[in-house]
Image: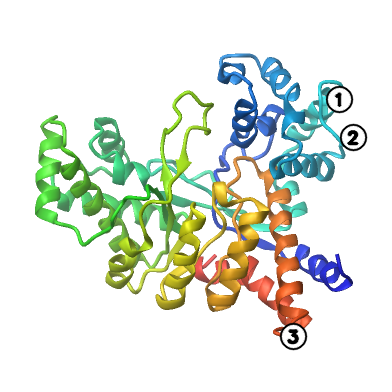
Amino acid sequence: MSDLETRLVAEILGIRAIDCHSHVPAESPHALSLLDLLGYHYYTELAHSAGMPAEAVDPAKGEAEQIGEMVTRIETLSNTVQYSWLMEAARELFAFRPERLGPKNWQQLAAVVAESGKQPNRYRVVLDKSNLEKVFLTNRFDEDLSGIDREVFVPCLRTDDLVFQLADPDVRHRLAVKTGVEIGSTDDLRDAVRWLMRYFVQHGAGSAAISLPPDFVPSAPDEAAAGKALARVLKGKELSADEATALAVFTFDVIAATCKQFRKPFQLMIGVLRNVYPAGVAGGRDLLSKQGSLMAYAGLFRRYPEVDFTVSVLSMAWEHELATFAWIFPNCKPSGHWWYANIPAHIEYALRARLEAVPKVKLIGYYSDMYKVEFGLPKFNMYRRLLGRVLAREFVETGRMTEAQAVDTARLLLRENPKRIFNV
């Protein structure tokens, strides 16, 4: 690492960032046990792929037994960036000094994690050390938001169930209980979604969000077709594929229109295929696909020019499209490096392309996608180091930016852009 890169990384590590997407549970945000760390789906799915039976981490088993299963296999993952996250979190947040975690020393780390977890508001200490000012949550549409610590956590209305599971009577029941609106028509659905957005905005929500399969096409909705599909659902009838699509497309459009009404961004995470590997561990059953195209979203971006769509993609084949769409559409804004794209080799490729092709004021650099706040530190630090490397080598050393301009650009990606786009 050159002196320039060392200086830039040091400056960037000091930028207090905004994390615009996580799965941190507001009621239990920090780790209470070592299993809260080792049980992160990255580790269980990688251990399973390396030979561990899925049953080894069955939640029905005791905590010590599950930890034992993981630590006996953790060395098989030691080449991965995910392992480096674990060890950096262990060193920086729990003063764990051994170079490797294994069967002979895991109890040492487990004891410190358990003791630290007892500290009141431990999550604030962790986020402060991670240099994270705000962390967005992923909230079910019927979740009670009243107890959220809004100084550090930002609610986000997750809409997957509304768009793709509305035919499920339980989903409609939950929606009626939360909003007081019994869904009997497409107008009722509009009223219910508006009620939800108003509730979320009143509790400080930053956005709506959804994960989407690669073949989803958010075309202009056919309300008549959606109404017929909804009528069949209410009679307990099965929907054909076309009917299910009509209802999903309509509901998605209702949410986009509601984002426009309430002036909130819509976070789109595109490209996931669900339950491809049913025999996998929890969280390790979904994959990506290169099929589809962002061209499917061009009509959406045109219909709602007032809505900021922050877009993440899973397939590297879509990365070039994302950069070009953000090049053209003012309301398409590349966001983070999602899931299977969240490894240094993929991040560096996408980051260079975005920085070279897209106005810097549109880029949301990174989000953690974490389930416990302890992973914010190593994941954001990974990104900060990569950002320092790219800015040093591709922009400052080549004379395209001064060192000060590179730091300002990093601050835009990590802090100023998400603060402005999400108004937090």
Quadrant including the C terminus: bottom right
Relative to 400, residue 204 above or below: above
Q: Amino acid at mark 1?
A: Asn
Q: Quadrant of residue 337?
A: bottom right
| Pointer 3 residue | 399
- Secondary element under disc 1, as helix, strand or loop, is loop
Mark 3 Cα within 10 Å, few/some/many (few <14, many 20+)?
Answer: few
Q: Nearer the viewer, residue 146 or 257?
A: 257
**Residues under numbered marks 2 and 1 in contact, where contact means CB atoms less than 8 Å apart:** yes
Q: Nearer the viewer, residue 82 or 92?
A: 82
Question: Is residue 151 visible from the viewing direction of this image?
Answer: no
The residue depicted at 86 percent of the width and 26 percent of the height is 108
Relative to 235, residue 121 above or below: below
The residue depicted at 69 percent of the width and 55 percent of the height is 380
| Pointer 2 residue | 98
Q: Amino acid at mark 2?
A: Pro
Q: Nearer the viewer, residue 379 or 74?
A: 74
Quadrant including the N terminus: bottom right
Mark 1 Cα within 10 Å, few/some/many (few <14, many 20+)?
Answer: few
Question: Is residue 166 visible from the viewing direction of this image?
Answer: yes
- Secondary element under disc 3, as helix, strand or loop, is loop
